[in-house]
Amino acid sequence: MTTVNKKGVRQMFDDIAWRYDFLNHFLTLGIDAWWRRKAIQLISYKEEAIMLDIATGTADLAISLIKYKHPFQVIGIDISEGMLEYGKKKIEKLELTEQIILQVGNGEALEFPDNSFDVITIGFGIRNFEHPEIGLSEMLRVLKKDGELVILEFSRPKSTILCHLFDLYFCYVLPYIGKLFSKHATAYTYLPESVKQFPYGDNFIEMMQQAGFVETTFAPLTLGVVSIYKGVKR
């Protein structure tokens, strides 16, 4: 089993940042963009909202928030400076530097005051937390009353046959392609193992509820390969 602590996760993402966007789109056949749009559709807030995108990476989700929801501002944080550098280049090219601010930040120790944000999003990042329950408590703290949390994360299909096919792709095909293109020996081996260990579905909903979120829901997409979670602060 490949285990990676926070320092190791940061270094791993720094190392693959140069290939991250290409492999994301290539390995998901471009469906990742549709997944992000489906997650964003669950957000009630629109104009004038202040949003926080945790584990923003190269800012794909932050950019999509601006495109589809038109908030006043999105702050994107990530532990990987390498990923953020690529995100900043994309934002500059799109002339969104005033609407999206990227900065180094840890989702388990948010450096923001209480009640700061209308919406928090995380796309494929919560499973990399060492202590997701601490991260969820931090998110609840910095959300405003009636604020919304939307999380997009990998999960596992319920069908036994689909689960075997999922494991075949994630455990053998994906690591091979990932290593070939990223030149990183373990990054795309870590991915399937982190998905297996993540408490998806009802188990994660229970974790959200224990952190204090209400009106919690989750919806599987693409035969259960990913799921969208939503919770509200009251």
Image (tube, rainbow, N blue to C red):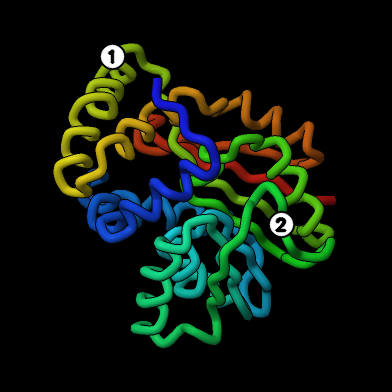
Q: Position of residue 193 (x, y in %)?
A: 40, 26
Counting residues from the start of the chain, the first of labels 1 and 2 encountered is 2
Callout 2 secondary element: loop
214 vs 167, left or right, is right
Structural distance between the alpha carbons of marks 1 and 2: 40 Å
Q: Residue at x 75, y 58 (%)?
A: 147
What's the amino acid at mark 2? Leu
Q: Position of residue 171 (x, y in %)?
A: 27, 24
The residue lying toward the viewer, choosing from 124 and 118, is 124
Mark seen at residue 110: 2
Q: Position of residue 138 (x, y in %)?
A: 75, 49
What's the amino acid at mark 1? Ile
The residue lying toward the viewer, choosing from 101 and 69, is 101
Q: Are marks 1 and 2 in contact (CB under 8 Å)?
A: no
Q: Nearer the viewer, mark 1 or mark 2?
A: 2
**Rendered position, 192 above or below 86:** above
131 vs 37, left or right, is right
112 vs 64, left or right, is right
**Rendered position, 218 above or below 75:** above
Q: Position of residue 43 (x, y in %)?
A: 60, 59
Mark seen at residue 161: 1
**Rendered position, 189 above or below 63:** above
